[in-house]
Amino acid sequence: MKEDAMCADDVSDHTIRVVNPATGSLVGEVPAGGKAAVAAAVDRAEAAQADWAKRDPRERGKVLGVGARAIRAQTDTLAALLTAEQGKPLHEARNEIQGCANVLEYYHSVSGSLRGECLPLSSYGLACVLKEPVGVCGAIIPWNMPVLIFAWKIGPALVAGNAIVVKPASSTPLTTLRIADILETAGLPAGVLQVVTGTGDTAGVALAATPALGHLSFTGDTKTGAGVSRAAGRNGVPVTLELGGSDAMIVCRDADIPAAAAGAVSGRFYNCGQTCTAVKRVVVDTSIKEAFIRALCEKVGGIVVGDGSRNGVGMGPMNNAAARDTICRMMDDGVSCGEGTLLCGGGIPDGEEYKNGLFYEPTIVADLPNDSALLNTEVFGPVLPVIAADGLDAAIEIANSIRYGLGASVWTRDIKTAMTASSQLDAGIVWVNQHLRIPPDVPFGGMKASGIGRENGSGAFEPYLRSKTVLVKP
Protein backbone atom coordinates (compact mmCIF):
# COMPACT_ATOMS: atom_id res chain seq x y z
CA MET A 1 0.00 0.00 0.00
CA LYS A 2 1.22 3.40 -0.85
CA GLU A 3 1.30 5.47 2.33
CA ASP A 4 1.14 8.78 0.52
CA ALA A 5 0.50 9.81 -3.06
CA MET A 6 -0.09 13.49 -3.65
CA CYS A 7 -0.03 15.62 -6.76
CA ALA A 8 2.20 18.68 -6.54
CA ASP A 9 -0.83 20.89 -7.19
CA ASP A 10 -2.49 19.60 -4.00
CA VAL A 11 0.26 20.86 -1.67
CA SER A 12 1.21 24.46 -0.94
CA ASP A 13 3.78 25.78 1.51
CA HIS A 14 1.22 25.76 4.31
CA THR A 15 -1.81 23.63 3.41
CA ILE A 16 -2.86 20.41 1.71
CA ARG A 17 -5.98 20.35 -0.45
CA VAL A 18 -8.13 17.27 0.07
CA VAL A 19 -9.90 16.49 -3.20
CA ASN A 20 -12.88 14.24 -3.94
CA PRO A 21 -11.48 11.56 -6.30
CA ALA A 22 -14.89 11.07 -7.96
CA THR A 23 -15.45 14.70 -8.92
CA GLY A 24 -12.18 16.56 -8.52
CA SER A 25 -13.90 19.03 -6.18
CA LEU A 26 -12.34 20.39 -3.01
CA VAL A 27 -13.43 18.64 0.19
CA GLY A 28 -11.24 20.53 2.65
CA GLU A 29 -7.79 21.79 3.54
CA VAL A 30 -5.41 20.80 6.34
CA PRO A 31 -2.04 22.11 7.50
CA ALA A 32 1.02 20.80 5.66
CA GLY A 33 2.95 19.93 8.80
CA GLY A 34 6.57 18.87 8.83
CA LYS A 35 9.43 18.36 11.26
CA ALA A 36 8.43 21.22 13.59
CA ALA A 37 4.79 20.08 13.77
CA VAL A 38 5.83 16.51 14.58
CA ALA A 39 8.26 17.66 17.27
CA ALA A 40 5.59 19.84 18.87
CA ALA A 41 3.08 16.97 18.81
CA VAL A 42 5.58 14.61 20.44
CA ASP A 43 6.26 17.20 23.16
CA ARG A 44 2.53 17.57 23.87
CA ALA A 45 2.11 13.81 23.95
CA GLU A 46 5.01 13.42 26.39
CA ALA A 47 3.47 16.02 28.68
CA ALA A 48 0.12 14.19 28.74
CA GLN A 49 1.32 10.59 28.84
CA ALA A 50 2.43 10.31 32.48
CA ASP A 51 -1.00 11.10 33.94
CA TRP A 52 -2.73 8.86 31.39
CA ALA A 53 -0.43 5.98 32.35
CA LYS A 54 -1.42 6.31 36.02
CA ARG A 55 -5.03 5.43 35.24
CA ASP A 56 -6.25 1.87 35.63
CA PRO A 57 -6.34 0.05 32.27
CA ARG A 58 -10.08 -0.51 32.66
CA GLU A 59 -10.59 3.24 33.01
CA ARG A 60 -8.54 3.85 29.87
CA GLY A 61 -10.56 1.22 28.05
CA LYS A 62 -13.82 2.79 29.19
CA VAL A 63 -12.90 6.03 27.43
CA LEU A 64 -12.53 4.13 24.15
CA GLY A 65 -15.87 2.44 24.76
CA VAL A 66 -17.60 5.79 25.23
CA GLY A 67 -15.87 7.08 22.11
CA ALA A 68 -16.96 4.04 20.11
CA ARG A 69 -20.60 4.66 20.98
CA ALA A 70 -20.27 8.30 19.92
CA ILE A 71 -18.69 7.22 16.62
CA ARG A 72 -21.58 4.80 15.97
CA ALA A 73 -24.08 7.59 16.64
CA GLN A 74 -22.43 9.69 13.92
CA THR A 75 -21.96 6.89 11.37
CA ASP A 76 -23.85 8.54 8.51
CA THR A 77 -22.07 11.90 8.84
CA LEU A 78 -18.65 10.30 9.16
CA ALA A 79 -19.32 7.91 6.27
CA ALA A 80 -20.29 10.78 3.97
CA LEU A 81 -17.01 12.55 4.80
CA LEU A 82 -14.99 9.36 4.28
CA THR A 83 -16.62 8.77 0.88
CA ALA A 84 -15.93 12.36 -0.15
CA GLU A 85 -12.20 12.21 0.64
CA GLN A 86 -11.43 8.55 -0.11
CA GLY A 87 -13.90 7.66 -2.89
CA LYS A 88 -15.37 4.37 -1.63
CA PRO A 89 -19.13 3.83 -1.89
CA LEU A 90 -21.22 4.94 1.05
CA HIS A 91 -22.09 1.40 2.16
CA GLU A 92 -18.37 0.57 2.33
CA ALA A 93 -17.67 3.79 4.21
CA ARG A 94 -20.39 2.98 6.75
CA ASN A 95 -18.88 -0.46 7.23
CA GLU A 96 -15.48 1.08 7.88
CA ILE A 97 -16.84 3.56 10.43
CA GLN A 98 -18.64 0.72 12.21
CA GLY A 99 -15.44 -1.33 12.01
CA CYS A 100 -13.51 1.47 13.70
CA ALA A 101 -16.03 1.50 16.55
CA ASN A 102 -15.91 -2.30 16.76
CA VAL A 103 -12.13 -2.27 17.20
CA LEU A 104 -12.26 0.36 19.94
CA GLU A 105 -15.00 -1.63 21.70
CA TYR A 106 -12.85 -4.74 21.50
CA TYR A 107 -9.93 -3.04 23.25
CA HIS A 108 -12.32 -1.71 25.86
CA SER A 109 -13.55 -5.26 26.45
CA VAL A 110 -10.06 -6.69 27.03
CA SER A 111 -8.59 -3.73 28.90
CA GLY A 112 -8.90 -5.54 32.23
CA SER A 113 -6.51 -8.24 31.05
CA LEU A 114 -3.49 -5.93 31.27
CA ARG A 115 -1.85 -7.16 34.42
CA GLY A 116 1.61 -8.26 35.43
CA GLU A 117 2.31 -11.44 37.40
CA CYS A 118 3.92 -12.57 40.62
CA LEU A 119 5.91 -15.81 40.86
CA PRO A 120 7.10 -17.29 44.17
CA LEU A 121 10.60 -18.61 43.44
CA SER A 122 12.11 -20.54 46.35
CA SER A 123 15.70 -19.56 45.60
CA TYR A 124 15.04 -15.89 44.91
CA GLY A 125 11.96 -14.87 46.87
CA LEU A 126 9.01 -13.27 45.13
CA ALA A 127 9.42 -12.33 41.47
CA CYS A 128 7.06 -9.65 40.20
CA VAL A 129 6.85 -8.86 36.50
CA LEU A 130 5.36 -5.42 35.96
CA LYS A 131 3.89 -4.27 32.65
CA GLU A 132 4.54 -0.62 31.89
CA PRO A 133 3.69 1.57 28.88
CA VAL A 134 6.56 2.33 26.51
CA GLY A 135 5.79 6.06 26.39
CA VAL A 136 4.96 8.08 23.28
CA CYS A 137 4.25 5.99 20.18
CA GLY A 138 3.93 6.86 16.52
CA ALA A 139 1.57 5.62 13.80
CA ILE A 140 1.61 6.24 10.05
CA ILE A 141 -1.75 5.55 8.37
CA PRO A 142 -2.48 4.75 4.70
CA TRP A 143 -5.24 6.20 2.56
CA ASN A 144 -7.08 3.03 1.60
CA MET A 145 -8.68 2.13 4.97
CA PRO A 146 -7.77 5.22 6.99
CA VAL A 147 -10.33 4.98 9.76
CA LEU A 148 -10.13 1.24 10.44
CA ILE A 149 -6.34 1.18 10.50
CA PHE A 150 -6.33 4.26 12.73
CA ALA A 151 -8.35 2.23 15.26
CA TRP A 152 -6.04 -0.79 14.91
CA LYS A 153 -3.11 1.35 16.00
CA ILE A 154 -4.51 3.69 18.64
CA GLY A 155 -6.65 1.07 20.44
CA PRO A 156 -3.91 -1.08 21.99
CA ALA A 157 -1.49 1.84 22.35
CA LEU A 158 -3.92 3.95 24.39
CA VAL A 159 -5.30 1.14 26.56
CA ALA A 160 -1.70 0.16 27.40
CA GLY A 161 -1.18 3.66 28.82
CA ASN A 162 0.78 5.30 26.04
CA ALA A 163 0.24 8.54 24.19
CA ILE A 164 0.35 8.36 20.40
CA VAL A 165 1.14 10.69 17.49
CA VAL A 166 -0.70 9.76 14.29
CA LYS A 167 0.24 10.84 10.75
CA PRO A 168 -2.70 10.15 8.39
CA ALA A 169 -2.22 9.97 4.63
CA SER A 170 -2.39 13.42 3.11
CA SER A 171 -5.26 12.52 0.76
CA THR A 172 -7.50 11.18 3.57
CA PRO A 173 -6.95 13.09 6.83
CA LEU A 174 -10.40 14.58 7.44
CA THR A 175 -12.36 11.68 8.92
CA THR A 176 -9.42 10.75 11.14
CA LEU A 177 -9.30 14.30 12.51
CA ARG A 178 -13.05 14.23 13.15
CA ILE A 179 -12.82 10.92 15.04
CA ALA A 180 -9.90 12.20 17.12
CA ASP A 181 -12.13 15.12 18.18
CA ILE A 182 -14.94 12.68 19.07
CA LEU A 183 -12.58 10.66 21.28
CA GLU A 184 -11.42 13.77 23.11
CA THR A 185 -15.03 14.78 23.70
CA ALA A 186 -15.62 11.26 25.02
CA GLY A 187 -13.02 11.79 27.73
CA LEU A 188 -9.60 11.17 26.20
CA PRO A 189 -7.28 13.71 27.85
CA ALA A 190 -5.98 16.49 25.64
CA GLY A 191 -2.54 15.66 24.25
CA VAL A 192 -2.73 11.89 24.62
CA LEU A 193 -3.78 11.50 20.96
CA GLN A 194 -2.08 13.84 18.49
CA VAL A 195 -2.87 13.95 14.75
CA VAL A 196 -0.29 15.67 12.53
CA THR A 197 -1.26 16.28 8.92
CA GLY A 198 1.37 16.48 6.21
CA THR A 199 2.87 14.53 3.34
CA GLY A 200 4.86 11.34 3.68
CA ASP A 201 8.15 12.98 2.73
CA THR A 202 7.74 15.71 5.37
CA ALA A 203 5.65 14.73 8.40
CA GLY A 204 5.99 10.99 7.75
CA VAL A 205 9.77 11.13 7.48
CA ALA A 206 9.99 13.31 10.58
CA LEU A 207 7.86 10.95 12.66
CA ALA A 208 9.79 7.88 11.53
CA ALA A 209 13.05 9.57 12.53
CA THR A 210 11.87 10.70 15.98
CA PRO A 211 14.21 9.21 18.62
CA ALA A 212 11.80 9.71 21.55
CA LEU A 213 9.26 7.12 20.35
CA GLY A 214 8.70 3.96 22.33
CA HIS A 215 7.20 2.22 19.29
CA LEU A 216 6.31 3.03 15.68
CA SER A 217 3.59 1.31 13.67
CA PHE A 218 3.42 1.74 9.89
CA THR A 219 0.97 0.46 7.30
CA GLY A 220 1.92 1.04 3.68
CA ASP A 221 3.80 -0.38 0.73
CA THR A 222 6.86 -2.57 1.14
CA LYS A 223 9.38 -0.10 -0.26
CA THR A 224 8.21 2.75 1.97
CA GLY A 225 8.10 0.40 4.94
CA ALA A 226 11.74 -0.50 4.45
CA GLY A 227 12.64 3.18 4.62
CA VAL A 228 10.54 3.67 7.75
CA SER A 229 12.24 0.68 9.38
CA ARG A 230 15.71 2.04 8.59
CA ALA A 231 14.86 5.49 9.95
CA ALA A 232 13.40 4.10 13.18
CA GLY A 233 16.21 1.58 13.55
CA ARG A 234 18.84 4.30 13.59
CA ASN A 235 17.31 5.44 16.89
CA GLY A 236 16.60 1.97 18.23
CA VAL A 237 12.83 2.46 17.92
CA PRO A 238 11.00 -0.88 17.53
CA VAL A 239 8.49 -1.12 14.68
CA THR A 240 5.41 -2.97 13.53
CA LEU A 241 5.15 -3.02 9.73
CA GLU A 242 2.04 -4.11 7.85
CA LEU A 243 3.21 -3.96 4.25
CA GLY A 244 2.16 -4.99 0.75
CA GLY A 245 0.36 -8.14 -0.25
CA SER A 246 -0.63 -10.09 -3.33
CA ASP A 247 -3.13 -12.51 -1.87
CA ALA A 248 -3.86 -15.69 -3.78
CA MET A 249 -7.34 -17.18 -3.84
CA ILE A 250 -7.17 -20.93 -4.57
CA VAL A 251 -10.33 -22.35 -6.12
CA CYS A 252 -10.26 -26.16 -5.90
CA ARG A 253 -12.03 -28.52 -8.30
CA ASP A 254 -14.72 -29.29 -5.71
CA ALA A 255 -15.43 -25.62 -4.87
CA ASP A 256 -18.89 -24.07 -5.02
CA ILE A 257 -18.27 -22.14 -8.25
CA PRO A 258 -20.97 -19.43 -7.85
CA ALA A 259 -19.91 -18.79 -4.25
CA ALA A 260 -16.23 -18.67 -5.22
CA ALA A 261 -16.92 -16.28 -8.10
CA ALA A 262 -18.90 -14.01 -5.78
CA GLY A 263 -16.10 -14.19 -3.23
CA ALA A 264 -13.51 -13.26 -5.85
CA VAL A 265 -15.56 -10.23 -6.96
CA SER A 266 -16.18 -8.91 -3.45
CA GLY A 267 -12.63 -9.75 -2.38
CA ARG A 268 -11.02 -8.00 -5.33
CA PHE A 269 -13.24 -5.02 -6.16
CA TYR A 270 -14.14 -3.93 -2.64
CA ASN A 271 -12.67 -0.44 -2.16
CA CYS A 272 -11.82 -0.41 -5.88
CA GLY A 273 -9.23 -3.12 -5.28
CA GLN A 274 -7.25 -0.85 -2.94
CA THR A 275 -7.00 -3.18 0.04
CA CYS A 276 -3.85 -4.87 1.32
CA THR A 277 -5.56 -8.25 1.73
CA ALA A 278 -7.67 -8.05 -1.42
CA VAL A 279 -7.82 -11.05 -3.73
CA LYS A 280 -5.04 -10.12 -6.14
CA ARG A 281 -4.58 -13.48 -7.89
CA VAL A 282 -7.11 -16.25 -8.49
CA VAL A 283 -5.52 -19.69 -8.88
CA VAL A 284 -8.23 -22.00 -10.19
CA ASP A 285 -8.11 -25.72 -10.91
CA THR A 286 -7.79 -26.32 -14.65
CA SER A 287 -10.81 -28.64 -14.67
CA ILE A 288 -13.20 -25.83 -13.65
CA LYS A 289 -11.39 -22.83 -15.13
CA GLU A 290 -13.85 -22.11 -17.95
CA ALA A 291 -16.94 -22.47 -15.75
CA PHE A 292 -15.38 -20.29 -13.08
CA ILE A 293 -14.41 -17.55 -15.55
CA ARG A 294 -17.93 -17.46 -16.97
CA ALA A 295 -19.41 -17.02 -13.50
CA LEU A 296 -16.75 -14.45 -12.60
CA CYS A 297 -17.25 -12.28 -15.68
CA GLU A 298 -21.02 -12.40 -15.27
CA LYS A 299 -20.75 -11.03 -11.75
CA VAL A 300 -18.19 -8.38 -12.74
CA GLY A 301 -20.58 -7.20 -15.43
CA GLY A 302 -23.10 -6.31 -12.73
CA ILE A 303 -20.78 -3.88 -10.90
CA VAL A 304 -21.98 -0.28 -11.18
CA VAL A 305 -19.02 2.12 -11.26
CA GLY A 306 -19.53 5.72 -10.22
CA ASP A 307 -19.46 8.40 -7.54
CA GLY A 308 -19.58 6.56 -4.22
CA SER A 309 -22.12 9.02 -2.81
CA ARG A 310 -24.74 7.81 -5.29
CA ASN A 311 -27.18 5.03 -4.44
CA GLY A 312 -26.56 1.75 -6.22
CA VAL A 313 -22.86 2.33 -6.92
CA GLY A 314 -20.84 -0.83 -6.31
CA MET A 315 -17.33 0.52 -6.99
CA GLY A 316 -16.06 4.06 -6.68
CA PRO A 317 -12.97 5.74 -8.13
CA MET A 318 -9.37 5.09 -7.23
CA ASN A 319 -8.15 7.41 -4.51
CA ASN A 320 -5.41 9.33 -6.28
CA ALA A 321 -3.99 9.97 -9.72
CA ALA A 322 -0.66 8.28 -8.99
CA ALA A 323 -2.41 5.02 -8.10
CA ARG A 324 -4.51 5.04 -11.27
CA ASP A 325 -1.51 5.96 -13.42
CA THR A 326 0.29 2.92 -12.04
CA ILE A 327 -2.61 0.62 -12.99
CA CYS A 328 -2.82 2.12 -16.48
CA ARG A 329 0.92 1.68 -16.98
CA MET A 330 0.90 -1.92 -15.78
CA MET A 331 -1.96 -2.79 -18.10
CA ASP A 332 -0.27 -1.00 -21.03
CA ASP A 333 3.04 -2.75 -20.35
CA GLY A 334 1.32 -6.11 -20.06
CA VAL A 335 -2.01 -6.93 -21.66
CA SER A 336 -1.90 -4.09 -24.20
CA CYS A 337 1.46 -5.37 -25.42
CA GLY A 338 0.14 -8.86 -26.07
CA GLU A 339 0.57 -10.48 -22.66
CA GLY A 340 -2.40 -12.57 -21.62
CA THR A 341 -6.08 -12.36 -22.47
CA LEU A 342 -8.30 -9.46 -21.47
CA LEU A 343 -11.66 -10.90 -20.41
CA CYS A 344 -13.45 -7.74 -19.34
CA GLY A 345 -12.73 -4.11 -18.45
CA GLY A 346 -9.23 -2.89 -19.08
CA GLY A 347 -9.52 0.87 -19.21
CA ILE A 348 -11.03 4.14 -18.04
CA PRO A 349 -14.82 4.09 -18.46
CA ASP A 350 -16.43 6.39 -21.02
CA GLY A 351 -19.09 8.91 -20.12
CA GLU A 352 -19.60 12.42 -18.83
CA GLU A 353 -19.88 11.30 -15.19
CA TYR A 354 -16.36 9.86 -15.29
CA LYS A 355 -14.42 12.70 -16.89
CA ASN A 356 -13.40 14.51 -13.69
CA GLY A 357 -12.84 11.42 -11.54
CA LEU A 358 -10.17 8.78 -11.11
CA PHE A 359 -12.19 5.82 -12.34
CA TYR A 360 -10.99 2.52 -13.76
CA GLU A 361 -13.10 -0.38 -14.95
CA PRO A 362 -13.24 -3.66 -13.00
CA THR A 363 -10.90 -5.84 -15.03
CA ILE A 364 -10.27 -9.58 -15.43
CA VAL A 365 -7.21 -10.95 -17.26
CA ALA A 366 -6.03 -14.51 -17.89
CA ASP A 367 -3.21 -16.48 -19.51
CA LEU A 368 -0.48 -14.12 -18.28
CA PRO A 369 3.17 -15.24 -18.52
CA ASN A 370 4.75 -16.22 -15.23
CA ASP A 371 7.02 -13.18 -15.16
CA SER A 372 4.20 -10.66 -15.68
CA ALA A 373 4.26 -7.70 -13.30
CA LEU A 374 0.53 -8.21 -12.84
CA LEU A 375 1.35 -11.50 -11.10
CA ASN A 376 4.54 -10.65 -9.22
CA THR A 377 3.95 -7.20 -7.77
CA GLU A 378 1.20 -5.75 -5.63
CA VAL A 379 -1.52 -4.53 -8.00
CA PHE A 380 -3.33 -1.89 -5.96
CA GLY A 381 -6.42 -1.37 -8.07
CA PRO A 382 -9.33 -3.18 -9.76
CA VAL A 383 -7.43 -5.70 -11.90
CA LEU A 384 -7.73 -9.44 -11.22
CA PRO A 385 -5.56 -12.07 -12.96
CA VAL A 386 -6.82 -15.65 -13.25
CA ILE A 387 -4.25 -18.47 -13.29
CA ALA A 388 -4.90 -22.15 -14.03
CA ALA A 389 -3.29 -24.87 -11.89
CA ASP A 390 -3.30 -28.66 -12.19
CA GLY A 391 -4.24 -29.69 -8.67
CA LEU A 392 -3.76 -28.39 -5.14
CA ASP A 393 0.03 -28.83 -4.94
CA ALA A 394 0.53 -26.75 -8.07
CA ALA A 395 -1.87 -24.10 -6.81
CA ILE A 396 -0.03 -23.79 -3.49
CA GLU A 397 3.30 -23.55 -5.32
CA ILE A 398 1.95 -20.68 -7.43
CA ALA A 399 0.50 -18.94 -4.37
CA ASN A 400 3.83 -19.15 -2.51
CA SER A 401 6.02 -18.25 -5.48
CA ILE A 402 6.20 -14.49 -4.92
CA ARG A 403 7.81 -12.34 -2.24
CA TYR A 404 4.60 -11.43 -0.41
CA GLY A 405 2.88 -13.40 2.32
CA LEU A 406 0.05 -11.35 3.77
CA GLY A 407 -3.11 -13.39 3.17
CA ALA A 408 -4.57 -16.21 1.09
CA SER A 409 -7.79 -18.17 0.79
CA VAL A 410 -8.79 -21.66 -0.26
CA TRP A 411 -12.23 -22.55 -1.59
CA THR A 412 -13.21 -26.19 -1.20
CA ARG A 413 -15.90 -28.44 0.23
CA ASP A 414 -13.30 -30.81 1.73
CA ILE A 415 -11.98 -30.08 5.23
CA LYS A 416 -8.80 -32.09 4.64
CA THR A 417 -8.01 -30.01 1.56
CA ALA A 418 -8.66 -26.85 3.53
CA MET A 419 -6.36 -27.84 6.37
CA THR A 420 -3.61 -29.03 4.04
CA ALA A 421 -3.63 -25.74 2.15
CA SER A 422 -3.80 -23.70 5.35
CA SER A 423 -0.70 -25.38 6.74
CA GLN A 424 1.32 -24.99 3.54
CA LEU A 425 0.43 -21.45 2.44
CA ASP A 426 3.03 -18.79 3.33
CA ALA A 427 0.55 -16.23 4.62
CA GLY A 428 -0.17 -14.50 7.90
CA ILE A 429 -3.89 -15.16 7.54
CA VAL A 430 -5.66 -17.91 5.61
CA TRP A 431 -9.39 -17.88 4.94
CA VAL A 432 -11.47 -20.92 3.97
CA ASN A 433 -14.47 -20.25 1.70
CA GLN A 434 -14.23 -16.53 2.44
CA HIS A 435 -11.74 -13.71 1.99
CA LEU A 436 -10.93 -10.22 3.27
CA ARG A 437 -12.83 -9.86 6.55
CA ILE A 438 -10.61 -9.50 9.65
CA PRO A 439 -12.14 -9.51 13.15
CA PRO A 440 -10.33 -7.44 15.79
CA ASP A 441 -10.03 -10.49 18.06
CA VAL A 442 -7.30 -12.28 16.07
CA PRO A 443 -3.70 -11.42 15.09
CA PHE A 444 -3.17 -9.87 11.68
CA GLY A 445 0.12 -9.39 9.84
CA GLY A 446 2.30 -10.84 7.12
CA MET A 447 5.25 -13.06 6.31
CA LYS A 448 8.20 -12.46 4.00
CA ALA A 449 8.03 -8.97 2.42
CA SER A 450 4.57 -8.35 3.86
CA GLY A 451 5.69 -7.11 7.21
CA ILE A 452 6.97 -7.50 10.75
CA GLY A 453 4.83 -8.06 13.82
CA ARG A 454 1.08 -8.42 14.30
CA GLU A 455 -1.83 -6.09 14.95
CA ASN A 456 -5.23 -6.90 16.48
CA GLY A 457 -6.03 -9.42 19.17
CA SER A 458 -4.80 -9.26 22.76
CA GLY A 459 -1.25 -9.86 21.48
CA ALA A 460 -1.30 -6.38 19.95
CA PHE A 461 -0.62 -4.98 23.43
CA GLU A 462 2.87 -6.48 23.52
CA PRO A 463 4.70 -3.83 21.43
CA TYR A 464 3.15 -1.13 23.60
CA LEU A 465 4.27 -2.58 26.93
CA ARG A 466 7.65 -3.25 28.48
CA SER A 467 8.31 -5.77 31.23
CA LYS A 468 10.06 -4.81 34.45
CA THR A 469 11.15 -7.59 36.79
CA VAL A 470 11.22 -6.94 40.55
CA LEU A 471 12.82 -9.60 42.83
CA VAL A 472 11.79 -9.34 46.48
CA LYS A 473 13.69 -11.29 49.12
CA PRO A 474 11.64 -11.78 52.30
Image (tube, rainbow, N blue to C red):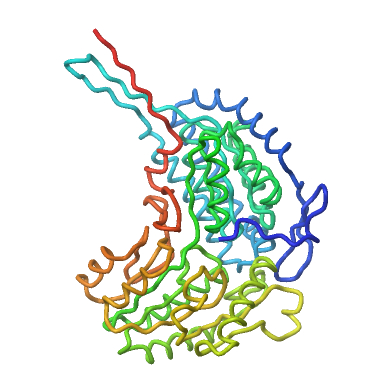
The residue that appears at 34% across and 22% down in the rendered structure is: 469
* Residue closest to the eye, 272 or 36: 36
Q: Residue furthest right?
A: 13
The residue that appears at 52% across and 58% down in the rendered structure is: 222
- At which x and y percent is residue 407? 40, 63
Drawn side of residue 294 relative to residue 2, left or right: left
**Res 349 seen here:** yes
Q: Residue furthest top?
A: 474
Tell me the quarter of the image containing the N terminus: bottom right
Tell me the quarter of the image containing the C terminus: top left
Drawn side of residue 29 relative to residue 160, left or right: right
- At which x and y percent is residue 414? 22, 75
The residue that appears at 72% across and 43% down in the rendered structure is: 34
- At which x and y percent is residue 249? 38, 73
The total of numbered circles placed on residues is: 0
**Relative to 405, residue 186 above or below:** above
The residue that appears at 39% across and 87% down in the rendered structure is: 292
**Relative to 366, residue 11 above or below:** above
Q: Quadrant of residue 462?
A: top left
* Residue closest to the eye, 172 or 322: 322
**Relative to 359, residue 227 above or below:** above
**Res 190 seen here:** no
Drawn side of residue 176 relative to residue 56, left or right: right
- At which x and y percent is residue 366? 46, 86
Q: Residue furthest left?
A: 122
